[in-house]
Image: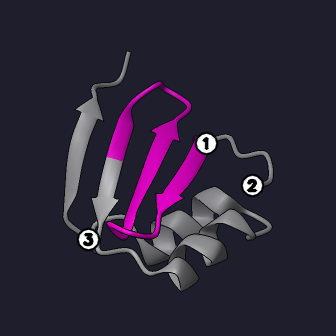
Amino acid sequence: MKKSTYLASISYDQSTKTMTVVFTDNAKIAYHGISARTYNAVAGAKSPGEKFTELVRDKYDFTILKQAA
């Protein structure tokens, strides 16, 4: 993933179709039902934060794993 001012890191579990996102404020959220194609689009984007907002944010169920610091 390219450097982002919004996303610190992302990871993907193909077996559960879950994308885990760590934000720059240290919040950690798991997004469910994400396709590998969507994950790859975010991970490979010139601006991962913008692509995440476009494709994932407010569009998938999620679980908050850690609140922002």
Above or below, 46 relative to 1: below
Task: Determine crowd level at label 3: few under 14, some 14-19, many 20+ residues with C-alpha closer than 10 A.
Answer: few
Residue indicated by mark 1: 9
| Earlier sequence position, callout 1 versus callout 3 | 1
Front in this rendered view, residue 5 or 41: 41
Q: Determine which of the numbered discs, if any, sits on residue 63 in the image.
A: none
Q: Which residues are magenta?
A: 7-29
Q: Is residue 59 magenta?
A: no
Disc 1 residue type? Ser
Disc assigned to residue 1: 2
Quarter of the image with the C terminus in it: top left
* Three-letter code for the amino acid on which mark 2 is drawn: Met
* Element at label 2: loop
Distance Cα–Cα, label 1 vs label 3: 18 Å
What residue is drawn where x is 50% and y is 37%?
Answer: 23
| Residue 60 position by quadrant | bottom left
Q: Position of residue 45 (x, y in %)?
A: 73, 70
Label 2 to label 3, Cα distance in Å?
21 Å
Q: Work out whether residue 17 or residue 49 is closer to the camera in this orientation and state it.
A: 17
User: Residue 48 appears in which quarter of the rendering?
Assistant: bottom right
Spatial separation of the CA atoms under disc 1 and disc 2: 7 Å
Q: Please name the residue shown 73% across and 62% down the image.
A: 47
Q: Secondary structure at mark 1?
A: strand
